[in-house]
Image: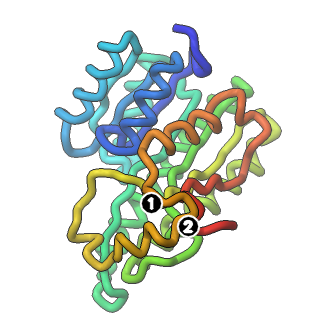
Amino acid sequence: MSGKLAGKTALVTGSGQNIGRAVARLFAAEGARVVVNGSKSRDKVEAVVREITDAGGSAHAILADVSDPAAWEAMIGETERVFGPVDILVNNVGVRRRMPFEEITPKMWREVIETNLSSAFYGARLVLPGMRGRRWGRIVNVSGYDGFFGQFHERAANVTAKAGMHGLTKAIAREYGMYEVTANTIAVGAIQTERDPSQYAHVDVEQVWKNLAIKHAGEVDDIAEAALYLAGESGRFVTGTVLHVNGGEYMA
């Protein structure tokens, strides 16, 4: 296939729905061979694969819990057998637990940190040696604006994980830039997605719209386009930075 990502292999975690699905579809449309990952619903990841292949793209489904280092080892091995080495890694998985600070147990804390932050480390450590050797690679970490502006209360674990994710991004960018490998963060703002309403019952949606410079919510395709910019040759001189996609709700 032709396209901005022709000949590249991309692994997109959490791509059975919402933002990950949009990224996987766009990357495939631009010529990438895409691994669609989920941890619970094989039906969802296989549905995304069918969407991509029906459109003439190349995709493969892998069910794996990215909070588990052993699952990462297996997923990278399968990716390499099917498509070859990973050129582009998009760490998109995230769990958001609304929990008053004093009710967070160590188990809850570890679940969020392992899923939202450690997973990005587990994946990067496996793909970066190959990227370094080929002198080309892209790491795109999907964070959230609560990791930068802390506007949501009762989200201590997620705020910590998402802030840490960008710290990881900068460390990778500094260490691997000399090998033409870039690492960047996308901070997602008010985007229309399917979500658990119980985790957002405290959010005043009307007030959110009022805070936006652009007076409507963003779409998952807006995040996918940002990921494409960072993943292609267009992002070759951009590294260690955060791209805020939030309609101007917060400006940095």
Check disc 2 and report the residue beneath it: 249
Q: Residue at x 35, y 20 (%)?
A: 52
User: Can residue 123 be seen?
Assistant: yes
Q: Is residue 104 above or below residue 211?
A: below
176 with respect to 82 (left or right): right
x, y percentage for residue 179? 78, 34
> Based on the displayed image, in which of its 4 quarters is residue 15 positioned?
top left
What's the residue at 36%, 31% (across, down)? 36
Crowding at mark 2 (Cα within 10 Å: few <14, some 14-19, many 20+): some
Residue pushed farthest bottom? 102
- Which dot marks residue 190? 1
Q: Name the residue located 30 percent from the left edge and 23 percent from the top edge.
A: 49
Type of residue at label 2?
A: Glu
- Pointer 1 and pointer 2: residues touching (CB < 8 Å)? yes
Instruction: Please tell me in which quadrant of the rendered image residue 81 appears.
Output: top left
Where's residue 133, x and y in %? Answer: 70, 27
